[in-house]
Image (cartoon, rainbow, N blue to C red):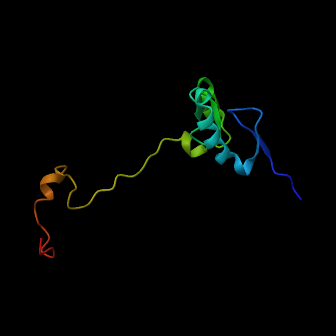
Amino acid sequence: MELEAIELCPYDPNHRIPASRLQYHLASCKKKNPKIAKKMANCKYNACHVVPIKRLKEHEANCVNRSAVDDEPLNLPKVTHPRFEGNENFSSAGNQITDPDVWNV
């Protein structure tokens, strides 16, 4: 039988939790330790990574769960509808019925 990885609780280092139960433990331990929780923050790449606020940027820059996609800017193609192309006034276009197949409006 393979042993499960044990994680240390960031709110109380005396707590040793199986990795599969860490998320549940963090939620309850955060409520029980509000003073410590105010000084801690969650990593945006993995909610189970709870670090002191002062070290959050450093952690996120080196987080093992950070993906390469996050490093690149998002370049999505511009999608336009042929009827609205060149016409940025969408509010007035909604008031006009230009399609003869649209009826009962």
In which quarter of the view is residue 100 placed?
Answer: bottom left
Say left or right for 4 vs 90.
Answer: right
Q: Position of residue 25 (x, y in %)?
A: 67, 44
Q: Nearer the viewer, residue 94 or 22?
A: 22
Say left or right for 73 vs 41.
Answer: left
User: Which quadrant holds the N terminus?
Assistant: bottom right
In which quarter of the view is residue 54 placed?
Answer: top right
User: Which quadrant holds the C terminus?
Assistant: bottom left
Q: Residue furthest toward the top?
A: 54
Residue sitting at 65 percent across and 48 percent down? 24
Q: Residue furthest toward the front?
A: 32
Say left or right for 20 vs 79.
Answer: right
> As displayed, is residue 47 above or below residue 85?
above
> As displayed, is residue 59 above or below residue 88?
above
Q: How many marks?
A: 0
Can I make out residue 46 in this image? no
Can I make out residue 80 in this image? yes
Q: Nearer the viewer, residue 55 or 16?
A: 16
Q: Position of residue 93 (x, y in %)?
A: 14, 57
> As displayed, is residue 32 above or below residue 4?
above
Q: Position of residue 46 (x, y in %)?
A: 62, 43
Q: Position of residue 90 (x, y in %)?
A: 18, 53
Residue sitting at 12 percent across and 54 percent down? 92
Q: Nearer the viewer, residue 43 or 17?
A: 17
Residue sitting at 20 percent across and 61 percent down? 83
